[in-house]
Amino acid sequence: MTAFRPIAGLSEIAGDVDLLLCDVFGTLHDAERTFALALDTLARFRRGGGTVVLVSNAAEPRAHFSATLAARGIRGVFDALVSAADVTRDALRERAVLPEPGAARGSVEAVHIGPERDRVLFDGLGITLGGSAAAPIVCTGYPEHDADLDEILVRAVRRGALMLCTNPDTSLGVGGRVLRFAGLVAQRYRHLGGCVVETGKPGPAIYAAALAAARRATGREFHPARILGIGDTPALDAGGALAAGFSAALLAPPMGDLPDLVGAGRRYRLPALVW
């Protein structure tokens, strides 16, 4: 097991980092408040010549998500933004350009599993939310009503449908409540024999999209050894960055065990995103 080295703030390692791939929820805000010190840290890193790409498993496409973040005061501290919705939309566009044999162009369908509010992901794509043939499943969260979830998944497995999962996280306990996420549905689909592609962290596609966004924003190439992923979820943020060949900084309390994660990058542990 490779230990996570404790550091007090990003300034301790900023000289070794050119590109910061930064999580959003839990790192920059908690839905109720925005973390001013975290925003100040990103601003300082950029003033020192660093590049920041926000990488989120949000089901909101880039433009919509940018507006949501701006309303929380998160603006002017990053160079680019990539969400799992963007990666999913790219995958759906590819399918729209090359439909199933015999299907008319523009007749592409998808099945959505998740909260109604997440359907902003499909805006402007010209995709019908249906379920015929081998229409892919886009899972953005645990459905608000799950009485027929197993039936939907079993039918999808039988027709060989691919599932695109934006948020592979499974659940989180908050104040005595258990919040269920898309990863639970994906887990169930795999168990039934279905095929799942993770369009969010820790899947590789979102990291490839983040690197492409960084290149577009700066015109530069970034060496993996000088890329740092940072966030508050061990498996998604730290595990995803390490699996992609980067270093990782995990926001975690000083005490407590951390999982053994695969990857050769450097590992850091800090209590919050501070300079």
Image (cartoon, grey):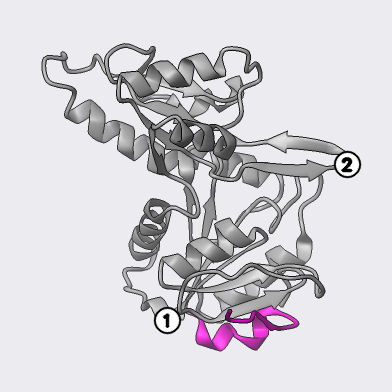
Q: Callout 2, which amino acid?
A: Gly
Question: Residue tagged by mark 2?
Answer: 175
Helix, strand or loop under label 1: helix
Q: Residue 86 location in percent, x, y?
A: 42, 41
Quick check: can you spot residue 60? Answer: no
Q: Residue 223: which quarter of the image?
A: bottom left
Measure how far apart labels 1 and 2 are at the Cα level. Answer: 39 Å
Is residue 11 or residue 218 the one in the foreground? 11
255 w.r.t. 111: above or below: below
Quick check: can you spot residue 102? Answer: yes
Q: Callout 1, which amino acid?
A: Ala
Mark 1 or mark 2: name the one nearer the start of the chain: 2
Q: Residue 243 location in percent, x, y?
A: 44, 66
246 w.r.t. 99: above or below: below
Question: Residue tagged by mark 1?
Answer: 225
12 w.r.t. 228: above or below: below
User: How packed is label 1: few (under 14 Cα within 10 Å), some, or many (20 or more)?
Assistant: some
Q: Residue at x 62, y 36 (%)?
A: 181
Q: Residue at x 63, y 53 (%)?
A: 24
Q: Residue 161 location in percent, x, y?
A: 33, 25
User: Magenta includes 210?
Assistant: no
Is residue 174 or residue 18 the one in the foreground? 174
Q: Residue 122 location in percent, x, y?
A: 43, 25
User: Magenta includes 15?
Assistant: yes
- Closest to the camera, between mark 1 and mark 2, is 2
Q: Quadrant of the N terminus?
A: bottom right
User: How packed is label 2: few (under 14 Cα within 10 Å), some, or many (20 or more)?
Assistant: few
Q: Residue 100: which quarter of the image?
A: top left
Q: Residue furthest left?
A: 102
Q: Which residues are magenta?
A: 1-17
